Image (tube, rainbow, N blue to C red):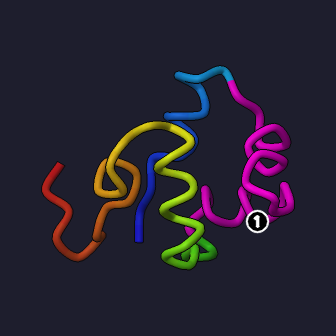
Amino acid sequence: MKNRIKVFRAMYDTTQEELANKLEVSRQTILAIEKDKYDPSLKLALKIAKFFEVPVEELFLDSENESS
C-alpha cells in the first residue's frame, strides 16, 4: 500500500521523530511506513490521518487501483 505521509510531514514541517512521538510509536515505525515496508494497523492509520486532519484515503493509496 502506497502512502503520502512524507509529503504531509513536509507540508506540516514535522520530522519523523516528532510524528512518532505524537503517535506514540518509534521513529523506525514511521520510516518503515513511509518506505512501504510496513502497513500500519487501522488504529494507527486513523491516528495518522487525525494528526494531519485528512481522511485516511488521502494518506494511503491502494497500489493495485492507483490511478494517479
The percent coordinates of residue 53 (x first, y second) are 44, 37
**Residue 55, position as x, y percentages in the image:** 32, 49
Q: Of residues 65 and 17, which is closer to you in this image?
A: 17
Residue at 13 percent across and 56 percent down: it is 67
Any magenta on residue 41? no
In this rendering, the count of numbered labels is: 1
Residue located 38% across and 59% down the image: 60
Neighbour tally class for label 1: few under 14, some 14-19, many 20 plus, Cα within 10 Å: some
Please tell me whether mark 1 sits on a helix, a strand or a loop. helix
Which quadrant, please, contains the N terminus? bottom left
Q: Position of residue 66 (x, y in %)?
A: 20, 62
Which is more toward the observer, 6 or 55?
55
Task: Name above or below for residue 30 compared with residue 15.
Answer: below
Q: Is residue 25 left or right of residue 67?
A: right
Report the magenta residues as a range.
14-36
Residue 34 is drawn in which quadrant? Answer: bottom right
Q: Residue at x 62, y 74 (%)?
A: 37
In the image, is 5 to the left or to the right of 18?
left
Q: Is residue 58 above or below residue 33?
A: above
From the viewer's perspective, is 52 left or right of 62?
right
Q: Is residue 29 magenta?
A: yes
Please name the predominant secondary structure of the magenta segment in the image: helix
Residue type, numbered disc 1 = Thr
- Seen at 56% across and 67% down, the residue is 36
**Residue 35 point in image, percent of width and height:** 62, 60
Q: Which residue is mark 1?
A: 29
